[in-house]
Amino acid sequence: MSHGLAIFVATALVACNGEGATETADVNLLETAQTRAVSIDDPIEPIPLRVEVDARKRALGERLFRDPILSPDGAVACTTCHDLANGGDDGRTKSDIVGRTPALVNTPSIFNAAFNFRLHWGGGYDELAAQLKVPIESPRVMATSFDEVLSRLRTRPDYRDAFAGIYPEGITQRSFTDAIVEFERSLVTPNAAFDRWLRGEADALTEREKEGYSIFKSHGCISCHQGVNVGGNMFQKLGVMREFFEERGTVTEADLGRYNVTKRDEDRHVFRVPSLRNVAVTGPYFHDGSAETLEEAVQIMSVYQLGRPLDDDQVDAIVAFLRTLTGRYEGGTRP
Amino acid sequence: MSRAARAVWIAALLGAAGLAADGWRTEPDPRVLDHYRRDIRELQALDARIDGQVMQSRQALVAHYDGIVQTMTDTNTVLARLERVEDLEGPADRERVVSGLGALRASLAEKAALVESFKSENAILRNSVRYFPIAAKRLRDELAASPETQRLAADVNDVLVSVLELNETPSSEEAWSRAQSSIDTLSVLVVPLGMEEDFEVVLRHAQTVVDRGVRVDAMTADILAVPSASDAVAVDTALERAMRDAYRRADHRKIVLFVTLLGAVVGLSVDIILRLRRSAAQERKATARLAEANEILVREKERERELLELKSRFISMTSHEFRTPLAVILSSTELLEAYGERWTPAKRADHFARIKDATAGMEQMLDSILVIGKSDSGKLEYNPVRLDLARWTHHLVDAFRPTLTKSHSLEASIDAALAEACVDEKLLNHIVTNLLSNAVKYSPAGGVVRFAVKRDGDRAVFVVTDDGIGIPAQDQPMLFDSFHRCSNVGHIRGTGLGLAVVKRAIEAHRGELHLASDVGRGTTFTVSIPLGALHELVE
């Protein structure tokens, strides 16, 4: 049995046995127990300071990631939607590339994507390599095929040389994917203020930010947003305590979330819990991009997921905490 | 063993060894199976770890799901590794392992889905477990502060206590119904104005703890009930069996290979031994042949040496024997040319006689050489003619007598009964003339040569006896060799050809020769020639 929970429950029982006079003391014990229960938790882990990647593959991958040669019209690169200088997403509700079908969901950030247990909102992909075919083939993104991309690359002596220098097989889907994934694995943002605080830098957070973290935990956000990515390691239904979609209205296929992957009824409106890493610079929020600001997003979560509203001060404190989750991309500018 | 048979036999052995080795290669490698077993053990450990992590999460012992996520990822990695069972060659093994892995994969997928649901539900439950006492306590304290709502505070406290108790004893039906009943009671009470929302939150989280607690516990039980552990054991058992079989088959192959190789080694050894023995015998034979050949070679060398010696003797002898009469002829001729007209007729006649003697001697010598040469090359002509032997002998003796000097005498005894014989007159002439002239030549002055011819049955016997120097015993074996001259001849001139001719002439007549000699006392030659050739001639 959990130390925290055991003490917490035991204390509560004691509190209930005694009536009246002992009540206040018992409630104090209860609070102590609860504090203890929270304090033994280390629900968020810092992002590792270093990720081991092959420098040559990473460099080639970055070149490919930034090169619009991947798209048939030479207009779209990976960075079109995953702006590395801007949070690793496109800052739009949903991407709407000129000449492409509009996207159905908000673009998730590419930063720290490697730490997510699944990829995409519905969690349809286990690995970066596997999901690569979606942006390549989707009519909403590159609208091309691997064969076409590889043919275009093969017309370029510089790419031929770059691949040949790393991969004996030259330009193939495998080597192409490998290089891009190697780069994506390097897209991590360590050294956020919160991570530095976790690592023992006591004044890395202000009192207000610490208060926000405290509410984040006690209010229940931490139930889903935990782990190294502050999310990204589980699925959750959007609308646990209140029906989100009924109140928003106009349910689309994209709102079915994981159901589109599994076709199981219990997976309707279930989404991969998004990471809150760099959340301050990756709005708008949610799969539908319906929340413009962090405050709005925190309040919606609190009501629909946790079943209780937050007052403005609490929201403000939580947002202050969330802003400390913005890290630094070592390979480029601060996101 | 013939070379072809040996080649076939070695090829068969190599083929057998090759088959055994090939079989060995295509057998599942026990080490590979060992890897699989290590993987399945790892998978079992990961499977157990998931169970542990799920229970820890249920009990809020772990703060986040990264551990579960990592374990699931590792599980999938190991499972993917395990599913490359192409190394298993034995169809039965493969089928057992593959079907076991299929079941394991299915149960792990089931478990993964349950774990995902568990994570979601448990997160909600934990949120409510964490928040419910806070909200309930706040509401209760607020209600307790006012005398009008104190009764409601007790009801809220009932919910608080019963729900917390339920959390302590989740499987208790009684605790569950008490918690549900307290919630039901609270939910129908009239709520003071402005506090509806607070009541709603407390009730919602209380209900969440009650409902989700049951649900999450059921999920935890379901997760633990997924037969992934026993499926893993089944795969492990199948792998163990496959491994045992593989080891046994590998052992069997090893024995086959060993026996094959042993057979090859033994067979080759036997073959080598046999060949060695054969070659030893052949070597002995070859050595014998070699010795024989060597002996022949030595003999031939000896003969060659003899021939060379003979040749050199012949050359030295002939050159000497011809030069002497030639010198006589030359000097007498020159003298006759220079002084012939002034010499007396007697002196001229003397020199002419010398020339004639020398010429005759040379002729005789050439004649002897021809006889010997022809005889040695098997070309001596034997021309028998009918001959009155007694008469012929008388004529010969009469012809010989004039050659005798006054110091020698010849006593001839010719048997009148000799009558006719069939002989080669020329060869017989050689025989008798040579023997008589030798007898004279090697006898001292005043010596008597006795010559007797008689008939002995169907043979004619010629006996020549002298009182001469005799023939030393050591010379007798070589007496009839060409150019051999006895050690005691001194200055008596001769060619060493006479007796060689005699011997060959006698052989031509298939006659016999006997010799009796005492050095210093004399020698007797007895020649016996068959008369009987007559009838051959008649025929």
Image (cartoon, rainbow, N blue to C red):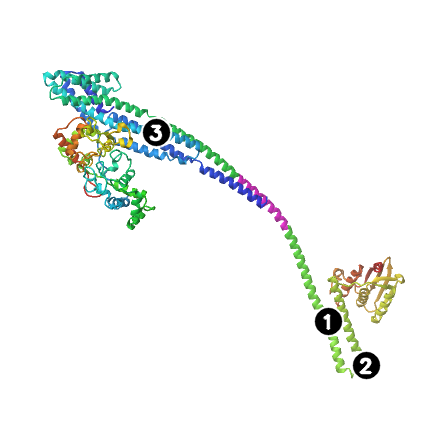
Packing grade of label 3 (10 A; few <14, some 14-19, many >=20) is some
Q: Nearer the viewer, residue A198 or B433?
A: A198
Q: Residue at x 66, y 53 (%)?
A: B292
Q: Are marks 3 and 1 on the same chain?
A: yes
The disc label shown at residue B479, or none: none
Category of crowding for the residue at label 2, using alpha-carbon neighbours closer than 10 angstroms: few (below 14), some (14–19), many (at least 20): few
- Residue nearest the viewer, comparing A276 with B328: A276
Q: Which mark is residue B345?
A: 2
Q: Which residue is mark 1?
A: B322
Q: Nearer the viewer, residue B529 or A167?
A: A167
- Residue A67 position (above or below residue B357): above
Circle 1 SS class: helix
Instruction: Determine which quarter of the picture holds residue A139.
Output: top left
The answer to whether the residue labelled 1 contacts the one labelled 2, judged by CB atoms less than 8 Å apart, is no
Mark 1 vs 2, N-terminal side: 1
- Badge nearest the viewer, 3 or 1: 3
Residue B335 versus residue B442: which sits nearer the camera? B335
Q: Tell me: residue B218, above or below residue A113.
A: above
Rendered image: mark on residue B106: 3
The range drawn in magenta is B263-287
Q: CA distance from mark 3 to mark 1?
A: 130 Å
